[in-house]
Structure formats: structure tokens, C-alpha cells
Amino acid sequence: MIITLLAHITPHCKDVAHLASQALDRPLPWSTRFNLQLHYWICEACARYRDQLRTLRQVLRRSPEQDHTHEISSPSPATKARLTEAFRAKGV
């Protein structure tokens, strides 16, 4: 019953994916953060997606290719390997 109630008052998964990304770039209002947390408690897929975004951000921040003045391109093989290793280590 509680899960059903939370499912009705929290954002839909599609909205959560968008908000999870925004939360990495800027502070969200406390009510939005609270609703996201409620959603993460009932939705394992969205919680996993948030964790993947966090891991991706952490790994890319450690990336030696941090010169963002060039066009966006595919990550280097070394960066891909670090990402794969980080996701496997976290079980994400």
C-alpha cells in the first residue's frame, strides 16, 4: 500500500532520469530532492541509473583527457576501460 502511494506522488521514471542528470549539474529544490529520494526507495532501476551517472561522472573527472575545448568525441580506450572497471566494481 505504501509503495502504491509513493508511486502516485513521486515523479515518473522518465522524469526521474531527467532530474537525476540535472541534480549533477545544479542544486535542485529540496522538495524535488525529497520526491526523488522517495522514488529511489521504490524504484531500483532509477536508483541504479542515478548510481551509474555518479560513477560515470567520477571516472570522467579522473580522466586525463580533460581538455574540453575540442569537439565531443568518443572516449578513449583507456577511459572506456576505466568506466567498465568502475561499473563492474560497483556492481552497477
Image (cartoon, rainbow, N blue to C red):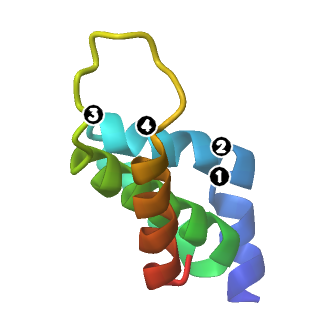
Q: Amino acid at mark 1?
A: Pro
Tell me how many marks there are. Answer: 4
Sequence-first disc among 4 and 2: 2
Judge left or right: residue 51 versus residue 59.
right
Residue position for label 1: 11
Q: Amino acid at mark 2?
A: Asp
The label number, if any, that marks residue 22 in the structure image: 4
* CA gap, disc 3 and disc 2: 31 Å
Sequence-first disc among 3 and 2: 2
Q: Is the residue 12 above or below the residue 87 in the image?
A: above
Quadrant assignment for the C terminus: bottom right
* CA gap, disc 1 and disc 3: 36 Å
* CA gap, disc 1 and disc 4: 14 Å
- Tell me, yes or no, whether the two marked residues, 1 and 2, touch with CB atoms within 8 Å: yes
Residue position for label 3: 65
For disc 4, the neighbor class at 10 Å (few under 14, some 14 to 19, many from 20) is few
Quadrant assignment for the N terminus: bottom right
Judge left or right: residue 14 versus residue 33.
right
